[in-house]
Image: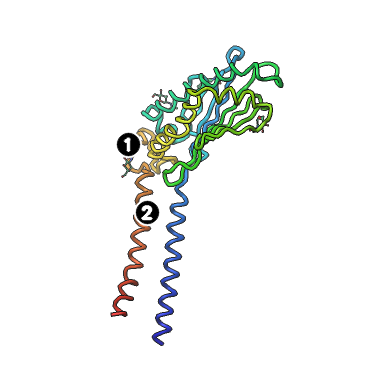
């Protein structure tokens, strides 16, 4: 009888631990984020056409788009950060980057034997995070859909996708300032932007009032705080369930 009770207790302990660990695991697992910017650059354009266009998104939700130096906020998060310090940081950086990409593209034209006319550069930056730690940062370049290569800024590795892009890639690799900029933007800058962007809500606050600024609403969701609270609740439940069991076992042993 007593033995059966102890076994039963051990079993429930194991079950509780299992449930708690999976609960903790899923809450931590959800704490992944990605910041992505897609940029299209042309060297020369016909009148009225932008030479640079782009869009940035956080976890797949666009918050900013632009052409040349005209930046437009998108969605609730975009509107919430419009005009703030992080908005200024991001737009200034993208503005600078667009001009640098355009120079790189212009300097690579003689390496392009497969295209005629105006080349178009598509650049995609992806920066990924788990629990606030950087787990991936890269740039993908594609010129006129024919010359593609990748630059992994985590390990500074370049990877050729189209063999014909070798000449262009080698030329870009030699530009130390450009490489440094790509690395800084996709790592340090992105980490900072992500931290600031997450302070602003993705969803509309419940209030339907149009006169109030959403950043002033008390119901505006503070993601950082919510995440802290969730971890705290998880920890508290672990302690609340394990403590009586441990005490029970100790008492029984004594
Ligand atoms: C560039 O963006 C501005 C602001 O969103 C917009 O008014 C303008 O029409 C856009 N121009 C082009 C050529 O897309
Ligand atoms: C973004 O903010 C600027 C001023 O900081 C304002 O002129 C503009 O209308 C805002 N854009 C949107 C879409 O709210
Ligand atoms: C490059 O762009 C072309 C056309 O947009 C597309 O078909 C191709 O898959 C792209 N290549 C890479 C590696 O992204
Ligand atoms: C959200 O909460 C955290 C922790 O309580 C705080 O550091 C941060 O400043 C808050 N952010 C906003 C936008 O209120």
Q: Earlier in the sequence, mark 1 or mark 2?
A: 1
237 up-or-down from 217: above or below: below
Q: Position of residue 214 (x, y in %)?
A: 37, 36
Q: Position of residue 75 (x, y in %)?
A: 47, 34
Determine the residue positioned at 54% across, 23% down: 174
- How many C-alpha atoms fall within 10 Å of the one at disc 2: few (<14), some, or many (≥20)? some
Task: Mark 1 vs mark 2: give the one in front.
Answer: 2
* Count of numbered labels shown in the rendering: 2
Q: Quadrant of the N terminus?
A: bottom left
- How many C-alpha atoms fall within 10 Å of the one at disc 1: few (<14), some, or many (≥20)? few
Q: Is mark 2 within 8 Å of ligand 4?
A: no
Q: Position of residue 166 (x, y in %)?
A: 64, 27
147 up-or-down from 251: above or below: above
Determine the residue positioned at 33% across, 60% down: 236
User: 57 or 250, which lies in front?
Assistant: 250
The residue identified by callout 1 is 216
The residue identified by callout 2 is 231
Splitting the image into four quadrants, where does ligand 3 fall?
Answer: top right
Determine the residue positioned at 51% across, 37% down: 155
Q: Is mark 1 within 8 Å of ligand 4?
A: no
Name the outermost residue toward the top: 47
Coloring basis for residues:
rainbow
Name the outermost residue toward the bottom: 1
Helix, strand or loop at mark 1:
helix
Q: Position of residue 207 (x, y in %)?
A: 38, 41
Quadrant of res 248: bottom left
Distance of label 1 from label 2 (alpha carbons): 26 Å
User: 105 or 83, which lies in front?
Assistant: 105
């Amino acid at each position: 009888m007593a033995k059966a009770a102890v076994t039963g207790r051990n079993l429930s302990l194991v079950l509780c631990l299992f449930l708690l660990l999976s609960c903790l695991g899923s809450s931590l697992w959800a704490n992944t984020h990605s910041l992505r910017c897609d940029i299209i650059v042309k060297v020369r354009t016909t009148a009225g056409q932008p030479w640079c266009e782009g869009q940035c998104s956080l976890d797949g939700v666009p918050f900013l788009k632009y052409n040349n130096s005209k930046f437009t906020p998108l969605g609730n998060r975009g509107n919430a950060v419009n005009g703030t310090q992080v908005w200024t940081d991001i737009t200034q950086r993208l503005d600078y980057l667009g001009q640098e990409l355009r120079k790189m593209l212009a300097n690579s034209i003689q390496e392009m034997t497969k295209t005629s006319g105006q080349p178009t550069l598509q650049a995609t930056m992806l920066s990924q995070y788990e629990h606030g730690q950087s787990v991936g940062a890269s740039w993908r370049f594609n010129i006129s859909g024919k010359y593609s290569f990748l630059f992994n800024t985590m390990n500074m590795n370049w990877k050729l996708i189209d063999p014909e892009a070798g000449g262009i890639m080698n030329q870009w690799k030699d530009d130390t300032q450009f490489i440094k900029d790509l690395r800084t933007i996709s790592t340090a800058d992105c980490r900072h932007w992500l931290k600031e962007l997450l302070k602003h809500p993705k969803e509309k606050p419940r209030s339907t009032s149009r006169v109030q600024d959403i950043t002033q609403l008390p119901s505006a969701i503070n993601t950082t705080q919510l995440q802290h609270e969730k971890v705290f609740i998880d920890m508290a439940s672990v302690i609340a369930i394990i403590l009586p069991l441990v005490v029970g076992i100790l008492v029984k042993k004594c």
